[in-house]
Image (cartoon, rainbow, N blue to C red):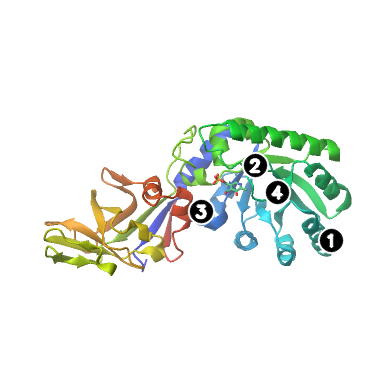
């Protein structure tokens, strides 16, 4: 490994999380895991391969290239693209056997034509807007649109109906309960309108897998919990999870500075006493966020040290104190365990005033991923 800054992907932990979800939801319903955004930074191909081996039923992506990447890696599981396809992407998406989201008439016409040209019957899932405010056909228009697909689009197969839940991770269940009720009712209306039941009615993201079993339906669609964090610190922890990644670098340089010496760009930190400063080869270009400047911490040999000065693009500095036994080459834990100390993804999210989703997605492709089975 030439670049010492790396993340370790704990595929064994991800497998533990998936098995926990499977145990909770039972064998009778399908399990889709979201592997969009490079599996939330954990490596879409590696996670998908493992998922296929252990009996996950479906994968979820955000973009056509994400789906193609999985097909090119030899993944055979059904892949649902969560959002609508543009017309220019349709031929490729159909050719790569991606299951596509539809929610609007003109787009459905275009997809019917692209599927006919490819000589295929293309599976589609109809997205219904029940309270997310992002994409989807309205509840009142959904039965007619479903009927149109079923009766007038011979090259489309209405295989699924789905919706999305924006606050299923909130301890107050009311809004989500209302959404699930509305969604079940519109699914019934669609079934009546087309005279049959579609195979897959689904709405449960991680928050609903954890806190709303009434929304599990035919399939669940967790993402963030697969990778070992709860969607919100207040979400009920009904399924135990283990962290999917840890993040490491090594000390690259040590120096002893006298009190008053400034450290880094902008001269934002001055040594309050004579002290050892360690430099580490990780910066905001790696996903080590610049907001950690003068605020973050790292672990070295089981002890916690403060980051001082600004995080640079590729390097950062740590105050090691007036005496130290830290040496060049020592392992530095940015996220994970060292001795009795731990820096969690949740701690990163809290310090950076964001969510764990963004923390893991932000870790740049430059950072080597080491897969632990
Ligand atoms: C449509 C859809 N389903 C499921 C998920 C997974 O959500 P989560 O990571 O909160 O479990 C997402 C992610 O945003 C999504 O967009």
**Disc ID at residue 116:** 1
- Which mark's residue is nearer the viewer, 1 or 2? 2
- Which mark's residue is nearer the viewer, 1 or 4? 4
- Which mark's residue is nearer the viewer, 4 or 3? 4
Q: CA distance from mark 1 to mark 2?
A: 33 Å
- If you read the primary sequence from the N terminus, does the residue marked by circle 1 or circle 4 appear first? 1
**Disc ID at residue 363:** none
What residue did someone put label 2 on? 131
Q: Secondary structure at mark 1?
A: helix
In this view of the protein, which residue sits in the foreground, 163 or 243? 163
Q: CA distance from mark 1 to mark 4?
A: 24 Å
What residue did someone put label 4 on? 136
Residue 83, placed above or below residue 140 = below
Label 3 near ligand 1 (CB < 8 Å): yes
**Residue 28 visible in image:** no
Is residue 263 shown left or right of residue 75?
A: left
**Residue 123 visible in image:** yes
């Amino acid at each position: 490994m030439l670049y010492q800054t790396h993340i370790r992907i704990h595929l064994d932990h991800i497998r533990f999380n998936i098995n926990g979800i499977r145990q909770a939801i039972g064998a009778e319903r399908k399990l889709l895991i979201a592997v969009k955004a490079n599996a939330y930074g954990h490596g879409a191909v590696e996670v998908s391969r493992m998922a296929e081996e252990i009996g996950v039923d479906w994968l979820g992506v955000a973009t056509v290239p994400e789906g193609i990447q999985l097909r090119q890696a030899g993944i055979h599981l059904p892949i649902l693209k969560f959002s609508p396809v543009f017309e220019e992407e349709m031929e490729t998406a159909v050719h790569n056997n991606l299951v596509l989201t539809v929610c609007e008439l003109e787009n459905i016409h275009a997809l019917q034509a692209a599927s006919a040209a490819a000589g295929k019957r293309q599976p589609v899932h109809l997205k219904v807007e029940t309270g997310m405010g992002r994409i989807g056909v309205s509840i009142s228009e959904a039965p007619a649109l479903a009927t149109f697909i079923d009766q007038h689009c011979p090259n489309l197969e209405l295989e699924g109906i789905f919706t999305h839940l924006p606050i299923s991770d909130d301890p107050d269940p009311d809004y989500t309960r209302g959404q699930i009720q509305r969604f079940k009712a519109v699914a019934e209306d669609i079934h009546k309108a087309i005279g049959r039941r579609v195979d897959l009615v689904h709405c449960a993201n991680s928050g609903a897998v954890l806190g709303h079993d009434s929304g599990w339906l035919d399939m669940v669609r967790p993402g963030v919990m697969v990778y070992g964090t709860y969607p919100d610190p207040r979400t009920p922890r009904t399924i135990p999870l283990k962290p999917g990644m840890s993040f490491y670098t090594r000390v690259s340089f040590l120096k002893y500075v006298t009190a008053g010496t400034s450290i880094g760009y902008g001269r934002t930190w001055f040594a309050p006493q004579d002290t050892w400063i360690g430099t580490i080869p990780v910066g905001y270009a790696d996903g080590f966020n610049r907001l950690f400047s003068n605020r973050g911490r790292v672990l070295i040999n089981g002890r916690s040290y403060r980051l001082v000065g600004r995080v640079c693009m590729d390097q950062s500095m740590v105050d090691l104190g007036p005496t130290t036994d830290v040496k060049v080459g020592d392992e530095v834990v940015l996220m994970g365990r060292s001795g009795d100390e731990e820096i969690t993804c949740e701690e990163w999210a809290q310090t950076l005033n964001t969510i764990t989703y963004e923390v893991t997605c932000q870790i740049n492709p430059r950072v080597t991923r080491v897969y632990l089975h």
